[in-house]
Image (cartoon, helix red, strand yellow):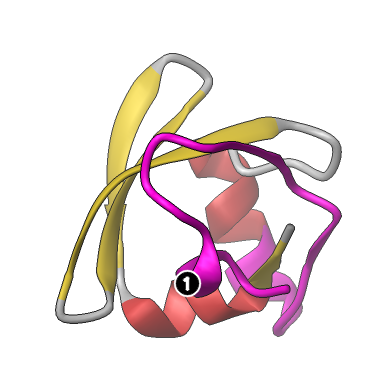
Amino acid sequence: MPLVFAKAGEVNKIKKIGGKDETKNFLNKLGFIEGGEIIVITENAGNLIVNVKDTRVAISKEMANRIII
């Protein structure tokens, strides 16, 4: 399921990152890697603040839809 459907505070594993190669590379540089853990901190109008690799990152709803957990 896409990351946008994850509940806040729940630990999830990234199974797949979709999109174009440049999108995948961008997310990889931010720490979003397949097999990595991700926690949704909060959601606001579909946009998410997540904890990945002990760092908080804000991502848009469109980016969150490309991350499959």
- Residue 16: x percent and y percent? 83, 62
Residue at mark 1? 4
Magenta stretch: residue 47 in it?
A: no
**Rendered view: 22 above or below 42:** below
Crowding at dot 1, Cα within 10 Å, few <14 / some 14-19 / many 20+, comes out as many
The residue most toward the top is 54
The residue most toward the left is 44
- Residue 35: x percent and y percent? 85, 36
Label 1: which secondary element: helix
Magenta stretch: residue 13 in it?
A: yes
Which residue occupies 36% across, 22% down?
Answer: 55
Q: Which residues are magenta?
A: 1-24
Image quadrant in which the C terminus is located: bottom right
**Rendered view: 29 above or below 56:** below
- Residue 33: x percent and y percent? 73, 41
- Residue 61: x percent and y percent? 36, 79
Q: Is residue 30 left or right of residue 57?
A: right
Which residue occupies 56% across, 54% down?
Answer: 27
To which quarter of the image does residue 17 belong?
Answer: bottom right
Q: Is residue 26 left or right of residue 35?
A: left
Q: Is residue 26 left or right of residue 44?
A: right
**What's under tag 1, amino acid-wise?**
Val
Which residue occupies 64% across, 74% down?
Answer: 2
Which residue occupies 25% across, 71% down?
Answer: 47
